[in-house]
Image: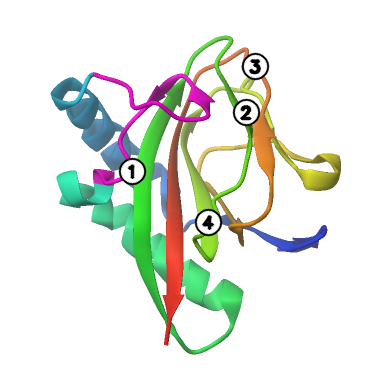
Amino acid sequence: MKIQTEAEIGIYTLDNYQELNNNLKNIFSDFRKKYPESDTSNVIGWHSHFDTHIKEPKFNILIDKIVDVSMDFIKIKCNLYPLNFWVMEYGKGNYAKRHNHWPATLSGVYYIDVEENSSPIIFENNFVIKPRNGMLLLFPSIVNHEVPPSQGKRIVASINLLLTP
């Protein structure tokens, strides 16, 4: 499904996401134990560094799926290169300030473990999407978005992709 705002936002549910998410939760837990310090960003909550895909290749089980879906989303023949990949854990009261992901081309957010009372993501023009487990959102990196203070836990992976010929 695609929804038109100022820019197109792709909303997908990955196949077999329950099994994928169970694997990702284990990878995330091990990663967080190995790298307990949070990186500084616009996210007020635990945030890995932007090179998480390099530090932990096990996340490629997700990155490969995101790249495949992204190729379908952009509908042009090109290569997509993961510029950044990181994971976050929001607890009660955690949020993300309004931001965008420029200078990347395409950005994505994947929801690994989302409690029912977790906050939505809000895109420009106050377009609100309530996250659910297995949901992948794709959008042009210049699109502003934010997450208000959450009442529930959520584990999320984000990616920035560069388009190359």
Mark 4 vs mark 3, CA separation in Å: 22 Å
In which quadrant of the rendered view does residue 120 lie?
A: top right
15 and 155: which is toward the camera:
155
Q: Secondary structure at mark 4?
A: strand
Residue under label 3, please give it. Answer: 149
Residue under label 1, please give it. Answer: 50
Q: Position of residue 134 (x, y in %)?
A: 50, 45
Mark 2 vs mark 3, CA separation in Å: 10 Å
Tags 4 and 2 in contact by the CB under 8 Å rule?
no
Q: Secondary structure at mark 2?
A: strand
Q: Position of residue 101 (x, y in %)?
A: 54, 50
What main secondary structure does the magenta stretch of the protein show?
A: loop
Q: Secondary structure at mark 1?
A: loop
Which label lies toward us, 3 or 1? 1
Q: Position of residue 124 (x, y in %)?
A: 78, 45
State which region is magenta: 37-52
Q: Amino acid at mark 2?
A: Lys
Residue under label 4, please give it. Answer: 107
Tags 1 and 4 in contact by the CB under 8 Å rule?
no
In which quadrant of the rendered view does residue 96 lie?
A: top right
Mark 1 vs mark 2, CA separation in Å: 17 Å
Number of residues whose C-alpha sits closer than 10 Å to that of mark 3, classed few (under 14), some (14–19) or many (20 or more)? some
Q: Position of residue 113 (x, y in %)?
A: 45, 31
Q: Quadrant of the C terminus?
A: bottom left
